[in-house]
Image (spheres, rainbow, N blue to C red):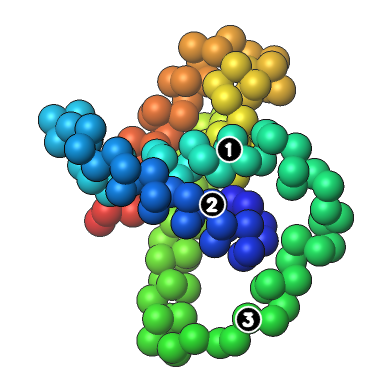
Amino acid sequence: MLRQRAWAEEILHECYITVWHNAASFNSALSSPLTWMTHIVRNRCIDWLRSGYARQFHADEAWLDDLSSTPGDVSLDEQHDRQVARLHHCLQHLSSEQRQSIALAYYQGLSHSDIAGWLQQPVGSVKSWIRRGLDHLRECVGR
């Protein structure tokens, strides 16, 4: 989401600290621990992207970490490839509205109202597309 390893590491470190300090406020009746932590990380990434700091760098510089990365364990790479293929397959079965809304929300960090403005559609429609699309992906990927 942040497109640069150093930025992601910094945000992840901040999120670990946030989780540590707020662990007592976690309510298991509202969500699972993984969901709670994922929302913290996602929201922190969105906040960071919207802060404008990321816009100071050129797009080419954002991918430098990817060029210097070393290949990992082959079995992990194969497992990752299978997961990516499964997700791609599931994404192809979404409507174009669902796919585009989810991509704008999760990869670009746009809010529902931002997506509605971008697509020139009502906010309620965007929320429905995202909710139904995520339900489909959860069911499809979980098989």
In contact (CB < 8 Å): disc 1 and disc 2: no
- Please tell me whether residue 140 is drawn above or below residue 77 in the rendered image: above
Mark 1 / mark 2, whichever is N-terminal: 2
**Percent position of residue 82, x then y:** 41, 71
Q: Which amino acid does label 3 sit on?
A: Ser
Mark 3, residue position? 69
Mark 2, residue position? 11
Question: Residue shown at 63%/24% (left/top)?
Answer: 115
Q: Residue 46 carries which label?
A: 1
**Percent position of residue 49, x then y:** 66, 40
Badge 2 marks a residue whose secondary structure is: helix
Mark 1 vs mark 2, foreground winner is 2
Mark 3–mark 2 distance (CA, rounded to whole Å): 19 Å
Q: Which amino acid does label 2 sit on?
A: Ile
Q: Residues within 10 Å of mark 2 (few under 14, many from 20)?
A: some
Q: Residues within 10 Å of mark 3 (few under 14, many from 20)?
A: few
- Please tell me whether residue 83 is drawn above or below residue 115 in the rendered image: below
Total numbered labels placed on residues in the image: 3
Q: Residue furthest left?
A: 29
Mark 1–mark 2 distance (CA, rounded to whole Å): 10 Å
Badge 1 marks a residue whose secondary structure is: helix
Q: Residue furthest front?
A: 21
Image quarter where the C terminus lies is bottom left
Badge 3 marks a residue whose secondary structure is: loop
Q: Which amino acid does label 1 sit on?
A: Ile
Q: Which mark is residue 59?
A: none
Residue 45: which quarter of the image? top right
Q: Is residue 99 left or right of residue 28?
A: right
Residue 17 shows up from this direction: yes
